[in-house]
Amino acid sequence: MRGRQGGPRKPAVRSARRRSRELALQGLYQWLVSREDSGAIEAHISEDPEFARADREHFQALLHGVVRAIDELHAAIEPHIDRRIDELSPVEHATLLLGAFELARHPEIPYRVVINEAVEVAKTFGGTDGFKYVNGVLDRVAARLRPVEAPPRR
């Protein structure tokens, strides 16, 4: 593949936080589909070679935090989606849950970073234009959860 300047494109370097989000997304996908215990899901995911390069603490906070706060997160997301929650693809659903959780419970992470990371994860794992949907929904969720930092757009 060629980059913008015509030279070979360097592979994207993913941070430990990005890896933790990607692995948490995979775990949440599994949880949404099977409702398996999140501890068992964590044990399975921790065997992945990528896990060694992930931020373990952030992964655990995301996976277990989303599962514990599922009702609160659905309440934050539902007013901003155009269909019922159970009609979302599992990838979009899990990505929206991760983003809403970080917006609600991790104020130290700027809202733009939360949304950008969710979009990048959606690009990696989701359908062709799923990232656009995730971006729009999380933008509105951010305006509600962080009104000072992310004022509503006109």
Image: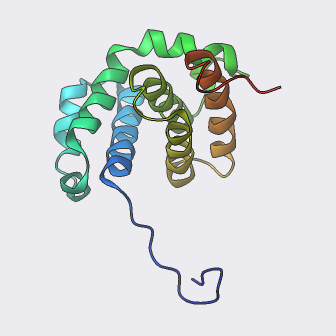
| x and y percentages locating residue 114 in the rendered image | 50, 37
Farthest residue to the right: give it: 154
Which quadrant of the figure contains the C terminus?
top right
Q: At which x and y percent is residue 62?
A: 33, 30
Q: In this view, does 72 lie to the left or right of 26?
A: right
Image quarter where the N terminus lies is bottom right
Closest to the observer, 22 or 58: 58
Residue at the far bottom: name it.
7
Residue at left 28%, top 29%? Answer: 61
In the depicted structure, whether residue 114 falls above or below residue 125: above
User: What's the image's color scheme?
Assistant: rainbow
Residue 144, quarter of picture: top right
- Quadrant assignment, res 60: top left
Residue at left 31%, top 30%?
A: 63
Q: Which residue is drawn at 18% across and 31% down?
A: 40
| Between 89 and 61, the one nearer to me in the picture | 61
Of residues 10 and 46, the one nearer the viewer is 10
On the image, the x and y values in percent for residue 81 come to: 68, 22
Q: Quadrant of residue 82?
A: top right
Position of residue 128 relative to residue 40, above or below, is: below
Q: Is residue 38 left or right of residue 19?
A: left
Indicate the position of residue 5 as horizontal and vertical percent values. Answer: 64, 85
| Picture mark count | 0
- Vertical arrangement, residue 53 with respect to residue 109, above or below: below
Residue under the point 39% across and 46% down: 22
